[in-house]
Amino acid sequence: MTSPLILVTGATGYIASRLIPRLLDSGYRVRALARHPHRLVGRTWFSRVEVIHADVTTPSALPQALEGVDTAYYLIHNMSRGRGYNSLELDSARNFAHAAEQASLKHIIYLGGLADPEQHIAPHMRSRIETGRVLREGKVPVTEFRAGVIAGSGSISFEMIRFMTELFPILPGPVWMQNKSQPIAIQNVIDYLAAALQNKNGQGGVFEIGGPEIATYKDLMLRYARARQLNRRMIIVPFLPVWFMAFGVDLMTPIPYPIAHALIEGLSADSIVNHPEALTVFPEVKLIGYDIATKDALEKTHPSYIERVWDDGVPGFKSLKHEGCFILHMN
């Protein structure tokens, strides 16, 4: 019997790059959707997937992408496009939900952001939550996972922690660096996404996912420093503008300003699991602690290289000195 065909959108992105090999190894057929499919050519799994060129902002491109698909992963964000990305994200989700309905899709699995929608949260976090709402307005069942900081080599939130900690012996931070986060290992994110294909109990639900520990953003950076045996201190600066921090990140790291700005804004509120139903519905997922996830991420960069897939899908490499400094090789 032919295995189900799974569509993975945002195929050049970080999550998709980790999810696709898991799906292939589990015996699924995979169709990878990308705006820039040529960027997939170097991936180890490229020859094992069907690649389709499409943009969810263009509705006419979606029927072909969804033809014959059983389940689709919606792993798209538009932060790198700068101003106006919020409305673009909602329009994209609306296009996809409608096309999925027309194609008689059975299931959409979406990865969004972890935040309390009843609180004052950053625009990009609000956009992630609204994207899930728009997808659920369609007739195709949607399983939504909401995650905060993802601990893994190549994760943009983790890489920002990595870069800032590596570069600065004294770390300046705003007062909300003391807000709470519940980081989750990339392996566990992929565990949840993959489990949603088989576990029908979760179909149609919204699940907040996080690791077994709650920590401040300050603590996450200092724990990374300890894992690297770096002597780091953090100084809380009461009035440190978001734009100024984002400009510094853009200047000192490969993380572009629009993404840095959105992520730093996201630190202004807690990002923790308030509704832990995922632990009951998906008991097969065994949570990994932040320190172990950090250790695993560092081992996966050995001997000092990691692939960057989050900068609009453009791969690149950066080397890491023992003393705590990056040498960037930009392409």
Image (cartoon, grey):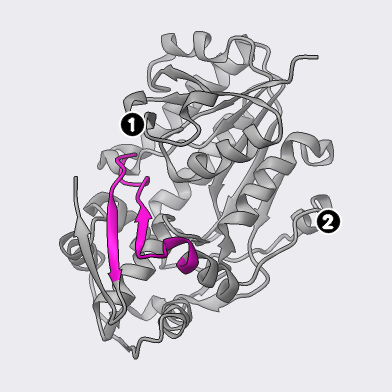
Q: Position of residue 24 (x, y in %)?
A: 63, 32
Which of discs 2 and 1 lies nearer the camera? The answer is 1
**Around disc 1, counting alpha carbons within 10 Å, would you say few (fewer than 14), some (14 to 19), or many (20 or more)?**
some
Work out whether residue 173 or residue 283 is closer to the camera in this orientation and state it.
283
The amino acid beneath tag 1 is: Arg
Visible residue check, residue 237 = no
> Residue reaching furthest left?
251
Q: Is residue 91 left or right of residue 243?
A: right
Magenta stretch holds residue 273: no
Q: Is residue 97 left or right of residue 160?
A: right
Residue under pointer 1: 39
What segment carries the magenta color? 298-320
What is the quadrant of the N terminus in the image? Answer: top right
Q: Quadrant of residue 328?
A: bottom left
Q: Is residue 105 above or below residue 132?
A: above
Magenta stretch holds residue 316: yes
